[in-house]
Image (cartoon, rainbow, N blue to C red):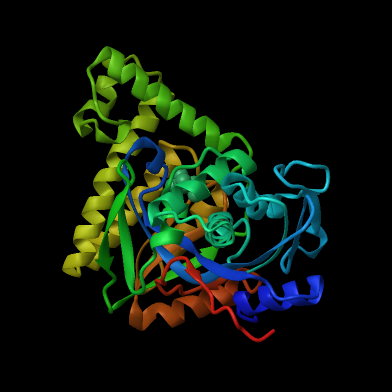
Amino acid sequence: MKDPAASAWSLFTAHFGCAPEVCTSAPGRVNLIGDHVDYCGGCVLPIAIDRRAAVCAGRMTGEIVHVVSRECPDERAAFPVGSTDGPRATRWAAYAAGAAVVLGVPGGLRMAIASDVPIGAGLSSSAALEVAAVLAMETLTGKTLSPLERATTARRVEHEHAGVPCGIMDQYAAMFGEHGHALLIECRDPSHNTVQLPTDAAIVVVDSGVRHSLASDDYGQRRRECESAFGKYARGVGPAPALAAIPLAAVQQSQWARAGWTAIEGRRARHVVSEVGRVHAFAAAISKGDMRSAGKIMSESHRSLRDDFDVSVPPVDALVEWLETQPGVWGARMTGGGFGGCVVSLVSRESAHAVLSRVRDRWPDRLAFMPVAAGGARVEPYDRPA
Ligand code: GLA
């Protein structure tokens, strides 16, 4: 497939008959470990991947925002400046144009989008687009945001224009991604350290084929359950900086009544607190080159997301179990928001191609690939040939 930035550029010039003023791109991500903890003040360990969303944009006179996209050609949209919910504004367009609304781009606007981040597969196609769009709008308005402000502004786009009350992980990874490294993000600040990926390990990502929109309320419901658990804990047991920061001993089942938790709140809290412990243990294991332990921790993470957080689904569980039985696979787990999407596995480099070909033999129609940890958002060369 053509490079997304070159495609967005061609689409822009073909559709609007002039060159864009700016072209930007940002990557999708795969989370190695630490799911459903970012919005609870925990830490996570994603990599930005070598698949990107690109946005080309230019101002125009008038009061209309026009958006065209390579992946969703039917979602051509035109709607008034300052709104992304006009009758013709579609979801994909809203991610991009929401950035224009949030950054207050004056007057009309043209945008062309192209992306090779698989859509709806739990690889943060929307965050990639939002971050690329924020960076493009920043250039058009002459505003200068810090990298962290770019990530939080992109998250605002997701909250206000896509209606998903997400945490910071996806937009942060799309902004700060580093080649060859995972990002150990402390989501409470937020800030990060990089963790070098071992050369003898590969990451294999396989799509379960099950699609689920985070905009359905399951994600929001998990978030509210965690907030409720934290509120009860703070009132009943004592102050804590965040749910993710309470002690592991306090989330054992024998302690749930003391916090006033329902069984659901107790299980949610147990997942969050134990998952944060696993993130640190996993980062330490891969830094030492102890892949067996790292793989075991991934599998424990999956079980916790399945049994305590209730965000896995049987086809994803079956895929995780199948991967875990393959020679050379150290561990596997669901990744991202859940309810479908992709599974991530840690595989010895020498076995990775064989694992991928077994996946492709078994599920020829499914996306399966070996992502490379890539760099974050960037302005693309301005004079790219169409
Ligand atoms: C989605 C959200 C993130 C995070 C993950 C689960 O990807 O956008 O903020 O909560 O789910 O870890």
In the image, residue 49 above or below residue 258: below
327 relative position to 107: left or right: left
User: Which residue occupies 55% across, 48% down?
Assistant: 314
Q: Position of residue 256 (x, y in %)?
A: 30, 20
Q: Where does the N terminus fall, quadrant-wise?
A: bottom right
Q: Position of residue 315 (x, y in %)?
A: 57, 53
Q: Position of residue 37 (x, y in %)?
A: 37, 41
User: Which residue occupies 42% across, 72% down?
Assistant: 374
In front of the other: 346 or 175: 175
Q: How many marks?
A: 0
Which image quarter: residue 187? top left
In the image, residue 355 above or below residue 253: below
Q: Where does the C terminus fall, quadrant-wise?
A: bottom right
Residue 330 visible in image: yes
97 relative position to 188: left or right: right
User: Which residue occupies 75% across, 76% down?
Assistant: 13
In the image, residue 273 above or below residue 88: above
In front of the other: 76 or 99: 99
206 relative position to 308: left or right: right
2 relative position to 139: left or right: right
Which image quarter: residue 61? bottom right
Which image quarter: residue 115? bottom right
Q: Position of residue 140 (x, y in %)?
A: 59, 61
In front of the other: 62 or 328: 62
Residue 30 visible in image: no
